[in-house]
Amino acid sequence: MNNNKYNYKVRFHLAKGENYMKWQVRDLNDPDGNPAYYDPDDTRLLMVNCKLGNKPSVAKKIFEGENKTVCAWVWCTHVWPLPGPETRVGKQYRYNPRSSPHWHTQDEINVDNCEIDKLTTLGRGIFKHV
């Protein structure tokens, strides 16, 4: 059972295979722990009460050249898969440990652990929902 306030963990799945390059949504209260996968080309995710999660020590190693492994996600209390692309989005939140070991925006260097009311996906990107 999940003991914190977040019910879901969302990340972009980069492992080779059937779900490569899809959004992975894991229900933290699901005893079986089976994630759901969504194609970013035809599904957007609306996430509520979000927090940008990161493992800084792992991200720093990847930034310095080690192989990529899972080190970032979005925690949220609710997530809804919706059809089609979102057309109105705000600030983009980016994560790529090869270019920066932190979540960041265009104007902010480190937004790790930042809490945002609503986020939405647009393709492979994560944006503030407006």
Image: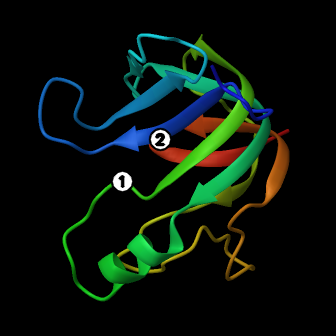
Relative to 105, is 107 above or below?
Answer: below
Image quarter of residue 4: top right
Q: Residue shown at 49%/11% (left/top)? A: 31
Q: In which quadrant is the C terminus drawn?
A: top right
39 and 70: which one is in front?
70
Q: Secondary structure at mark 2?
A: strand
Identify the mark nearer the N-term, 2 or 1.
2
Image quarter of residue 46: top right
17 and 4: which one is in front?
4
What is the x, y in percent for residue 112?
68, 67
Q: Secondary structure at mark 1?
A: loop
Relative to 84, is 9 above or below?
Answer: below
Q: Residue shown at 60%/25% (left/top)? A: 45
Amino acid bearing label 2: Arg
Q: In which quadrant is the N terminus drawn?
A: top right
What is the x, y in percent for residue 76?
71, 34
Q: Residue shown at 83%/48% (left/top)? A: 116
Q: Which mark is residue 70?
A: 1
Q: Residues within 10 Å of mark 1 (few under 14, many from 20)?
A: some
Read off the residue under disc 2: 11
Determine contact: label 2, label 1, CB under 8 Å. yes
